[in-house]
Image (cartoon, rainbow, N blue to C red):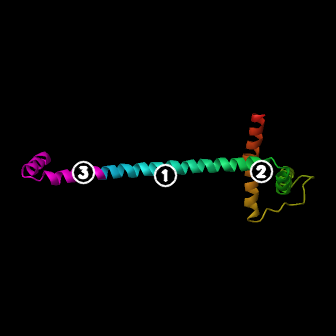
Amino acid sequence: MIAALLSFLVKIGAGGILDKAVALLESRAAAATDQKKIEADLTAEYLKQVIEETRTLADLNAKKLAVPWFWIFAALFLVPLAIWWAAICLYNMLWCPDCVYAQTWTIAAFPAPLDQWAGNMIQWVFYIGSGVAGLRAILK
């Protein structure tokens, strides 16, 4: 039906209008293709920048972890946290209300936001610290 209509328009001399309509449709298709290409290029460029940022931060962390002063500073926070954690473990192992050796002391919980910070430090030690130590062992 559309083919018959187009044939009729060509026969009555409207071929120029049809050519312009076809050209318009082709230009719209090309523009849509260009827009998709631009979107893909922008996405690829964004991912390249994210990867570059990750590499930069990894290099910064590698340099930071190689400095002894960083470990001294980290120890100022991690050693008290380790002592607190060991006290909790000891307390729970010795907790026996009917036993002769029952302790009479208690351990205070960290107030907010220190409890969240302590959790973040533990994650850092096991995720980042262990990862760096494992990477160093592999690379040596």
Residue hosting label 3: 23
Q: Tell whether position 7 is magenta.
A: yes
**Does dot 1 land on a helix, a strand or a loop?**
helix
- Camera-side residue of 87 and 120: 120
Residue drawn at the location 58% of the way across and 50% of the way down: 49
Please state the extent of the stretch shown in magenta in the rendering: 1-27
Q: Which residue type does callout 2 highlight?
A: Lys
Q: Which residue is at the far right?
A: 100
CA separation in Å, label 1 and label 3: 28 Å
Locate residue 13 relative to residue 30 in the image: left or right: left
**Does dot 3 land on a helix, a strand or a loop?**
helix
Could you classify mark 2 by the number of other residues whose Cα lies within 10 Å: few (under 14), some (14-19), or many (20 or more)?
A: few
The number of discs equals 3
Q: Is residue 95 visible?
A: no
Q: Tags 1 and 3 in contact by the CB under 8 Å rule? A: no
Residue hosting label 2: 64
CA separation in Å, label 3 and label 2: 60 Å
Position in image of residue 103 (x %, y %):
90, 56
Q: Tell whether position 53 is magenta.
A: no
Rendered image quadrant of residue 112: bottom right
- Camera-side residue of 19 and 94: 19
